Image (cartoon, coloured by chain):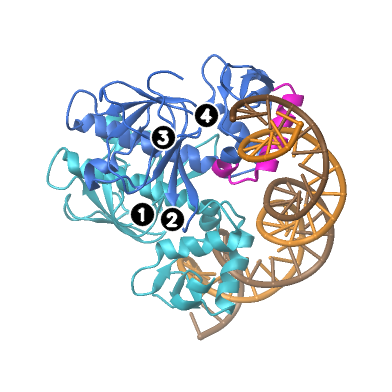
Chain colours: A blue, B cyan, C orange, D brown
Amino acid sequence: MGLFVLADGKQPSASRTSCTYAPGGSIYQVGSDGLAWRVQSGVIRLDAPGAGDNRFASLAIAGDVIGCESMLFGTYAFNAAALTQCQLLPWPEGESMPTGDSLLYSLATAQKRAAEVVALRGGEALTRVVNLIRLLADASGSVVLPMRQDIADITDLRFETVSRIIKRLERDEVLAPAKICGVHATRSFSINMVGLAAV
Amino acid sequence: MGLFVLADGKQPSASRTSCTYAPGGSIYQVGSDGLAWRVQSGVIRLDAPGAGDNRFASLAIAGDVIGCESMLFGTYAFNAAALTQCQLLPWPEGESMPTGDSLLYSLATAQKRAAEVVALRGGEALTRVVNLIRLLADASGSVVLPMRQDIADITDLRFETVSRIIKRLERDEVLAPAKICGVHATRSFSINMVGLAAV
DNA sequence: CGTCTGCTTGATGAGGCTCAAGATCAGTGG
DNA sequence: CCACTGATCTTGAGCCTCATCAAGCAGACG
């Protein structure tokens, strides 16, 4: 945890540097005002506020832009929370307004991401969890997962079911626990890519 | 396929007028090039092409912009098909490039729609179908539904399950069949709003 | 040490899937 | 108008996946 750890949602003093959030930290709340952000790393959960509860609405990962509705309406339309450690950069960079191309790119990315999230909520339970792992894995074959309950919210399963599936993937040697300093031991894995493809 | 070929083969009279598609008609295919469109009325299904099959990716209804990725990449990223009779207008209107505000608005709308579609794939079967009906109903309390199979793809249920649920809503007098000329008799309903709210 | 949060695991059963048969609907041609 | 045809919708019976409930375990932290 360094200079820009902001699990409480406060804004950094230097507005053009990236900000880091710890797992579970709230990034912004629906109805409040603030900047739009580009995700540099990590996984962010967007929720639509329901009657008292938070309904999972979407996922944002590296490259996605979140909170841009505040540029149009003045306030955020979702709650955003960090599921893993993540870094955000104010968006757009260097200008007060985004260019047309930049916006178009964000729109296309948002639609692609939405399609992926929709796919995570269909088909068998095992497939859903495996597809989420694929989405969150980095190129080097390691992955830091959100909590079981968050995975359950994303995939519309129960956390017990998610736990059983991940444990099964461990036993089948598709996932191998990989200790990363500061990350809960049950959430960081190295992936057997061949095994994952075979599932 | 030409830009203005309608599902029934007719051509529109002028290029800036809206174009109509019949239920089941293909609007565009992934990889082909063409304009972006704003949906004026009706329901459109976007699919991500999989291995031979079409995986449901998202839904577009009145007000949504579809196909804008072609403005950036030159080709469409999804297959689009009409689920009910629908009208499209080339987008942006009157200009060669959309304004920043127009794009921002489309981005915000897309994210809101994505959250709604995600919600349609979680919770109990009855809730999912009822929420889809709410989404598609017009202000006057009538609704034209897609085919059972398309509803099943959207909600990640089986078409038999969807059929049972809609029939149950009819028996509970939440939905009343409403004959509309040219629409399949099993897809057009008037809604008992009080009954629907009570489900 | 106790407490709290998150994870694992077992037993049980209900909701929705599967398979199968028939009914209805819309279009076509006699 | 009617018969025919293919597509769509309805309904039943049986079964399986996953939800539910419950108990215990593992780390983190004061």
Span of residues in magenta: A152-174
Q: Which quadrant is the C terminus of chain B positioned in?
A: bottom right
The amino acid pointed to by label 4 is Leu
Left or right of residue A57, residue A99 in this image: left
Task: Kindly identify the residue that appears in the image at 58 percent across and 18 percent down.
Answer: A142
Looking at the image, residue A175 lies above or below residue B108 = above
Q: Is residue A32 visible?
A: yes
- Cα separation between marks 3 and 1: 53 Å
x%, y% of residue B152?
56, 55
Q: Which residue is mark 3?
A: A8
Q: Is residue B185 visible?
A: no
Task: Kindly identify the residue that appears in the image at 60 percent across and 54 percent down.
Answer: B157
- Nearest to the observer: residue A195 or residue A86: A86
Task: Kindly identify the residue that appears in the image at 26 percent across and 50 percent down.
Answer: B38
Q: Which residue is mark 2?
A: B24
Q: Which residue is mark 1?
A: B7
Of helix, strand and loop, which mostly describes the magenta segment?
helix
Subunit that carries the residue with mark 1? B
Q: Which residue is mark 4?
A: A135
Report the residue that reaches farthest toward the left.
B94
- Cα separation between marks 1 and 2: 8 Å
The secondary structure type at the circle numbered 1 is loop
Subunit that carries the residue with mark 4? A
- Of the two numbered discs 3 and 4 on the same chain, state the one appearing first in sequence: 3
Q: Which quadrant is the N terminus of chain B positioned in?
A: top left
